[in-house]
Image (cartoon, rainbow, N blue to C red):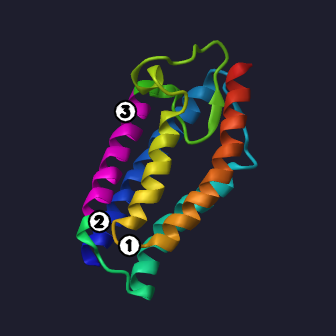
Amino acid sequence: MSAYLVLIGLVVLERLAELAVARRNLAWARSRGGVEYGRRHYPWIVVAHVALLGAAPAEVWLLGRPFVPALGWPMLAVVVLAQGLRWWCIGTLGRQWNTRVVVVPGMPLVDRGPYRWLRHPNYVAVVAEGLALPLVHSAWLTALAFVAANAVLLTVRVRVEDAALSR
């Protein structure tokens, strides 16, 4: 359990780093006339991600979920790969990356890096991590709940993002 808490702590630190990058990028975008879309759904995304990071270790502790090596190690690999994909997206988008949907007028769509193959590769990372992180330590209820909530949120988010980018 203590190693799992360390993993959760590392993911929390990664998320805080993301938020620092997002704040800096938001200021940059706003200074160039950036317009934010989908403000109403953003708090729900935050709630879902915070809930994931709290519920997974809570489920392990409260329900005595074991670490099952045949499941846990592959899921840990998925978590690490998801982080790699997420930071590849962040690096590729540069200042255009954000946790919010912000469009700077006149900026071209990015079509390099993972965006060469997928329109929303960051969401692939989110889905993979949201499923795998709880399953590292058999927290399958958290994995199911996050995947279901995230599916609803991403349906809204992708529609908002696609509409904003098409303007």
Q: Is residue 79 magenta?
A: yes
Q: Residue at x 25, y 66 (%)?
A: 70
Q: Amino acid at mark 3?
A: Trp
Q: Above or below — where is 48 with respect to 160?
A: below
Q: From the top left corner, tell me how far across and down residue 74 is, in percent.
A: 28, 57
Residue on which the image places disc 2: 72
Residue on which the image places disc 3: 88
Q: Amino acid at mark 1?
A: Ser
From mark 1 to mark 3, how far is it between C-alphas? 28 Å
From mark 2 to mark 3, how far is it between C-alphas? 24 Å
Q: From the top left corner, tell me how far across and down residue 73 is, in percent.
A: 25, 61
Q: Above or below — where is 11 with respect to 164?
A: below
Q: Above or below — where is 64 with respect to 71?
A: below
Q: From the top left corner, tell me how far across and down residue 131 is, in percent.
A: 46, 58
Element under label 1? loop
Q: Amino acid at mark 2?
A: Gly
Q: Say how many tags the image has.
A: 3
Q: Looking at the figure, which quarter contains the C terminus?
A: top right
Circle 1 crowding by C-alpha within 10 Å: few under 14, some 14–19, many from 20: many
Q: Is residue 166 magenta?
A: no
Circle on res. 138: 1
Residues shaded magenta: 71-91
| Along the viewing direction, whichever of 48 and 151 lies nearer the viewer | 151
Do the residues under discs 2 and 1 have CB atoms within 8 angstroms? yes
Left/right of residue 3 with respect to residue 108 in the rendered view: left
Circle 2 crowding by C-alpha within 10 Å: few under 14, some 14–19, many from 20: some
Left/right of residue 77 with respect to residue 138 in the rendered view: left
